[in-house]
Image (tube, grey):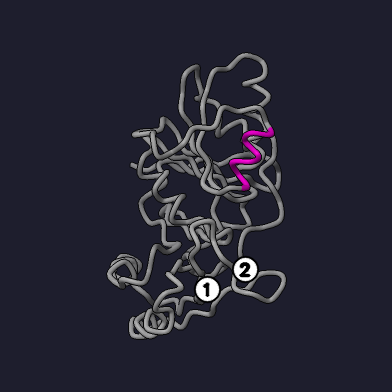
Amino acid sequence: MGESPLVASDGLAERALEGVTQGMKIGFGAGRTPARAIDLLGVRATAGLDVAVVAASESAEARCRAAGLTVLDFATVEELDLLVDGVDEIDRDMRALKGSGGAMARERIIAWASRRTIYMAGANKVSDRIGTLAALSIAVLPFGLASTRAAIRRVGLNGVVRLDMNGGFFVTDNGNLILDVSLPGDEDFEELAGDLSAIPGVLDHGLFLHEADRVLIEQASGEVEELERA
């Protein structure tokens, strides 16, 4: 489960950036999918496009700097013009699962602060119901981990603590742990999101039910399908 190793193609990334103009402030998610858009925007900036960016992870921020982009301290930014991000899974109601990179708390804050959001996905990430292809990721405080896991079990989910490549706990840029959960398939997503958000030890979760304004889906043929929120 998690984000595909494939990155966005030039065509998909270009579509995501087609409305970018001088002076805009743009947010980027943390995954592989928006990485190509970062690189392409860097090329445009080198050619004279005056934009500034924020990124949802330290690695994405480093990529922005390497691309020659002006990176803002998000603590000083009230509003962004655009967010460009990827998903682990999305359905045709534009409900998404995110969190394979562990940055969903920052990604949600950036989405909330953005006037418009665009999410990119390959056709292999589109399902009839989210939770079919990817796990639900839940960011939790290390403090009180056992009690937080117990509370999550009481809402019907059993989370497995994510490990890193060395067998230790995977720790996010914010110093949190991640629980990965397989969804049973009969949950009410709105109710579940509310239940998780009500647990004090839960910092955030990967249910992005209303964040997407526009979704770009790349088919195997290279054609791009667009979904727009009404």
Instruction: Name the residue rendered at 66%, 30% in the picture.
Output: 40
Q: Amino acid at mark 1?
A: Asp
Q: Amino acid at mark 2?
A: Met
3 or 228: which is nearer to us?
Answer: 3
Indicate whether residue 212 is drawn in magenta: no
Q: CA distance from mark 2 to mark 1?
A: 10 Å
Which of label 2 and label 1 is nearer to you?
1
Relative to residue 157, is residue 51 depicted above or below? above
Badge 1 local density, few (<14 within 10 Å), some, or many (20+)? Answer: many
* Magenta segment, prevailing SS (helix, strand or loop): helix
Indicate whether residue 61 is drawn in magenta: yes
85 or 125: which is nearer to us?
Answer: 85
**Percent from the top left, x then y, of residue 135?**
53, 70
Instruction: Name the residue rendered at 43%, 56% in the picture.
Output: 105
191 on left or right of 157: left
Q: Residue furthest top?
A: 48
Which circle's residue, 2 or 1, is located before the other in the chain? 2
Instruction: Name the residue rendered at 55%, 26% in the picture.
Output: 18
Q: Residue 72: which numbered mark, if any? A: none
Relative to residue 82, is residue 100 depicted above or below? below
Q: Residue 180: which numbered mark, if any? A: 1
**Percent from the top left, x then y, of residue 175?**
50, 62
Magenta segment = 59-66
Q: Identify the secondary structure beneath mark 2.
A: loop
Q: Identify the secondary structure beneath mark 1.
A: strand
**Percent from the top left, x then y, of residue 2?**
61, 64
Q: Are marks 2 and 1 in contact (CB under 8 Å)?
A: yes
- Residue that label 2 marks: 1
117 or 81: which is nearer to us?
Answer: 81
Quadrant in the rendering for residue 156: bottom left
28 or 69: which is nearer to us?
Answer: 69
